[in-house]
Image: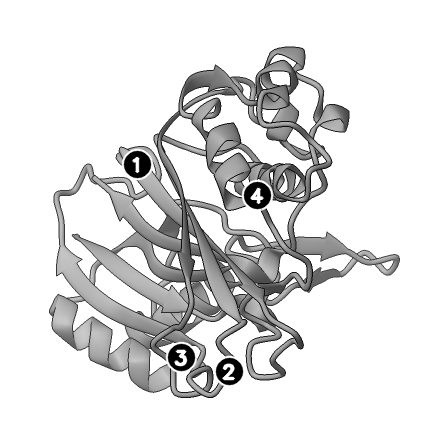
Amino acid sequence: MQNIRLIIEYEGTNYRGWQRQDRPQASGRRLQKKTIQGVLEETLSKITKERIRVIGAGRTDSKVHALGQAANFRTKSKMTPEEFRRALNSMLPKDIVIKNAQRVKEKFHAQFDAKSKHYRYIIYQGSTPSPFLKDYVFYIPYKLNLKAMREGAKYLVGKHDFSSFELSGSSVRNPIRTITKLSITSYRSYRSPITVHRSLNSRFIFIDCVADGFLYGMVRSIVGTLIEVGRGKISPSKIKEILKARNRRLAGPTAPAKGLYLIKVGY
């Protein structure tokens, strides 16, 4: 039995997130939604002629993207990791790519062994939105006070109860998480052939968050709240009160999923 770890890059626009989902119908039949996990399992089952279960490091939401999602699966196949990588990339949809495949120890578990996760949220500002970026960034036409946003972000770094930044529908019992990095960086230009023509008045804002784990919707809730700080609707010091209250209604709105990227999973 082999245990294979995959590093996966995907464009999440056309998917209902990572996790395989089944929805019961009135007829009693079940309708399977298109998910990254579901597509991978279906493709691997075709390759190995086995029933394969893929374990992901994190459950990215609908329309969230990934540059470095990690996952593992077990198989009786004698194929090498590189053969799996090539076979998968030849059969998967073009918006899912296997960047790396390697054999790992039998006990390795992509979710439970993860030590950290790095998410990046991308905001685009300019006089007009870009049709080329509509599925990949959150366009904001108004000015943001980045100094105030950075000040507010400092209160979120460390070990806290993040209940105020958790969306409803979560089954997680322990809301304590530790954020080790929360940075906000502004770029006047970006290395992309479709954006170099944009005016000098446009810019990208990267919000990078690294933690030992995340609650459901936590990053997007944090981003939405920091945007409200940047607009002057919430003071930076108010973040402390929001954290302490453990009440989602006191935080800002949830930022759209399309601007969120899972960059890397640390082990």
**Residue 253's spot in the image, x, y percent?**
72, 41
1 and 113: which is toward the camera? 113
Q: Element at badge 4?
A: helix
Question: Label 4, label 1: how many angstroms apart (C-alpha)?
Answer: 19 Å
Q: Nearer the viewer, mark 2 or mark 3?
A: 2
The tag earlier along the polypeptide, 4 or 2, is: 2
Q: Residue at x 82, y 58 (%)?
A: 25
Sequence-first tag of 1 and 3: 3
Work out which residue is located at the far front of the displayed protein and give it: 200
Q: Which residue is mark 2?
A: 198
Badge count: 4
Quadrant of the rendered image containing residue 142: bottom right
Amino acid type, callout 1: Ser
Q: Position of residue 166 (x, y in %)?
A: 62, 31
Q: Secondary structure at mark 3?
A: loop
Question: Could you tell me the amino acid type at mark 3?
Answer: Leu
Left/right placement of residue 233 relative to residue 237 reads: right
* Kind of residue sitting beneath label 4: Val
Of tags 2 and 1, which is closer to the observer?
A: 2
**Residue marked by disc 3:** 92
Mark 3 is surrounded, within 10 Å at the Cα level, by few (under 14), some (14 to 19) or many (20 or more) other residues, namely some
* Callout 2 amino acid: Arg
* Camera-nearest label, 4 or 3: 4
Disc marking residue 267: none
Q: Is residue 23 left or right of residue 151?
A: right
Measure the alpha-carbon separation of dots 1 and 3: 27 Å
Q: Residue at x 53, y 41 (%)?
A: 219
